[in-house]
Amino acid sequence: MEATPAANVVTTTVSDHIALVTISNPPVNALSTAVRRGLQRAIEETSADPAVHAVVICGAGSNFIAGADIREFGLPPQAPSLPEVGALIEACPKLVIAAIHGAALGGGLEVALSAHYRLATDTARLGLPEVALGLLPGAGGTQRTPRLIGAQAALDLMLTGRHASAREALRLGLIDHLATSDDIAAEGIAYARSLLSDGSPVRRSSAQTDALADRAAQQAAIDAARADVQKKRGLFSPGKIVDCVQAALDLPFEQGLATERELFTQCLESPQRAGLIHAFLAEREVAKAPETRAARPRPFQHVGVIGGGTMGAGIAVALLDAGLTVTMIERDEAALTLGRSRVAKVYDGLIQKARMTEDGKAAVLSRFHGSTTYDALAHADIVIEAVFEDMAVKKAVFAELDRVCRAGAVLATNTSYLDVNEIAASVSRPGDVVGLHFFSPANIMKLLEIVVPAQVSADVVATGFELARRLKKVPVRAGVCDGFIGNRILAVYRQAADFMMEDGASPYEIDQMARAFGYPMGPYEVSDLAGGDIGWATRKRRAATRDPRARYVPIADRLCERGWFGQKTGRGWYLYANGARTGQPDPEVEAIVAEERAKAGVTPRRFTQDELQRRYLAAMVNEGAKVVAEGIALRPLDVDVAMVHGYGFPRHRGGPMKWADIVGLPTILADIRAFAQEDPLFWAPAPLLVQLVASGQSFDSLNRA
Ligand code: T1G
């Protein structure tokens, strides 16, 4: 999109004493330096213009203002700052009205709160989501919002980052008036006229006191929020937000503003800001693949799902939730009934939580069909196969699809590691075959690996991305290799964990390290949740091709041989007494670990948590670099998005490649070279990593290539 010349990002038209100030900075009217300068000029000029009695600020396009320009963070600040623009707007001697449609988020809402009156269209969304970027509202939001709506409501908006509807905003007191049409400029001008004719005074948010009057109640809300924040694993900015609202209660406005500025700067300098903004931008960048630029998706409404197991049923629910029509195919009626019940169970759960009605369920399931014959898919636009992970079984399914599906139908496999090229080559239309690798539970997990085989046509890949958009999934383009991006990297850092376990660390220490780093679970807890038998099958499958020189730790096999697969068998690495979802360390597991160490001739040693973390992450980053170098992932950011959305990598660290950039690639490479002293095969440094260090570049430099 052609950038709007700086001169035109803010325009002012005056008619009949009302100045209409319009911000036009596509795609979301972010408050770039040019917009801030434009707003400053507009307010200065209209303040000084005797013909102007009131000023209406609105946004062109589909939004008011989506906040500060995220891409400017980390760059040298340019004047005026947003707090200065806010102060100018608030100090304006003429009535200033913010006319809101679409998004008024972050700095965008702060601009509106600096105005004297606010109206919004019915579909507008208002919020202060800075916490999602590791920041806090840094343009007066933490001081003006509590003064308008009280500490509790303000903290709720700032700590959740959620978007409030216009009606809720009116109820809260964030806005004063609901527009009756979507013509926001006209609505704004009409509202300004009515305020002028009512003789409404200039009303500065910074001077409002009512909402904070009941000091005890406000303090209670702040204390409750502080207690809540302490539960949030290692996040930096939430605590600062609470400190700011405390300042809003305790201090005069200007001093509160100074506190906000100081704490905002601390958040800006925190690595979490870099990680979270990277995650925000990266999950939008991943949707831009060569195929989505080169081709348009094929239209689709009817999707077939082969298999009604856990994955098939989850995929069906995701498709139904996106408003698509679904036909599930199973080998016989009994299996089909099971598949149907798995789908229905999800909606029954929503009804129990009062998040759906029986009518709602019936309406969704009216788009859900089942059959035991493939002919039911003759008119399907897309078919997703989710059957047992066996090449012969997959090929048999695709042979049927090749027989019945209409020309132009997209044939997709949900395999998590099998060779998609081989599956494609087994049908008469390999150009229509693509991998769509969902993650369990498929109706919940955001990640969708779009696996691109050699013969696929660009519009089929583009259709995969469009499907992801419709399912509100985060798509990551992946090349064909064993495990694609995510599972391939998982296998390697899991090996690193097993090596540390055999060398002396307990599986519980390793899980503790991962949780301390920000993961919701450690690798052994994840194995127990997913089922140790899945990894066991992978290890057995790979045994034939494993490099005989490669180190192999059989401890996990010992547990699986005992049938200790995890939660589903009541024990795995942990004990799950009486169906508990949280496991207890198991002394028998530690005994097996000690026994296997002895067999391997290993004298166990102590590991610090720091060393555990360095090895775990170095293995992840090193394999990530190989995946990028081989073109399995387009860019390092694709690895980051896959690991954040599919493998629990802590979002505030941005992803393994971003984390490595923040730590410094020379440090990571030095670690890998040190670890390679013990095991040169496993710890062979990725040539891409060596090259980037040698040229002083970062992984991020490849994201921009
Ligand atoms: N700055 C720069 N670019 C932005 C942006 C922003 N604030 N918001 C969105 N974009 C880009 C985005 O990268 C994408 O680019 C395109 O716009 C469309 O976005 C001082 C510190 C507004 C609800 O956190 O939540 O203000 O990929 O795909 O689904 O206190 O974007 O096309 O090149 O998401 O319709 C606070 C972030 C900033 C809001 C629209 N604001 N944005 O959703 O489109 S911090 C936010 C959103 C701040 C002050 C502080 C959403 C949206 P590209 P999209 P969408």
Image (cartoon, helix red, strand yellow):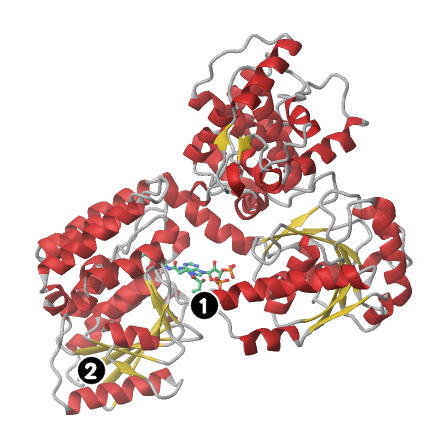
* Residue 74 seen: yes
Classify 10 Å Cα crowding around label 2: few (below 14), some (14-19), many (20 and above): many
- Is residue 599 placed above or below 198 in the rendered structure? above
The residue drawn where x is 49% and y is 38% is: 521
Question: Which kind of residue does numbered mark 1 sit on?
Answer: Pro
Q: On the image, numbered disc 1 is attached to which residue?
A: 26
Q: Position of residue 106 (x, y in %)?
A: 32, 61
Query: Residue 691 appears at what percent x and percent y?
Result: 59, 28
The residue at label 2 has a CB less than 8 Å from ligand 1:
no
Mark nearer the N terminus (1 vs 2): 1
Query: Could you tell me which residue is drawn at 14 percent across and 60 percent down?
Result: 217
| Mark 1 neighbour class, 10 Å CA radius: few under 14, some 14 to 19, many 20 or more | some
For the residues labelled 1 and 2, the Cα–Cα distance comes to 26 Å
Kind of residue indicated by mark 2? Ala
Viewer-proximal residue among 128 and 490: 490
| Residue 201 on image: x %, y % | 11, 81
- Residue 58 visible, this orientation: no
Front in this rendered view, residue 370 or 298? 370
Apparent side of residue 244 relative to residue 660 in the rendered image (left or right)? left
Q: Which quadrant is the C terminus positioned in?
A: top right
Q: Nearer the viewer, residue 415 or 485?
A: 415
Mark 2 sits on what residue?
A: 54
* Count of numbered labels shown in the rendering: 2
- Name the residue: 33% across, 46% down: 76
In-image side of 504 versus 135 (left or right): right
Say whether marks 1 and 2 touch (CB < 8 Å): no
Q: Nearer the viewer, residue 183 or 238?
A: 238
Q: Secondary structure at mark 2?
A: strand
The quadrant of the rendered image in which ligand 1 is seen is bottom left
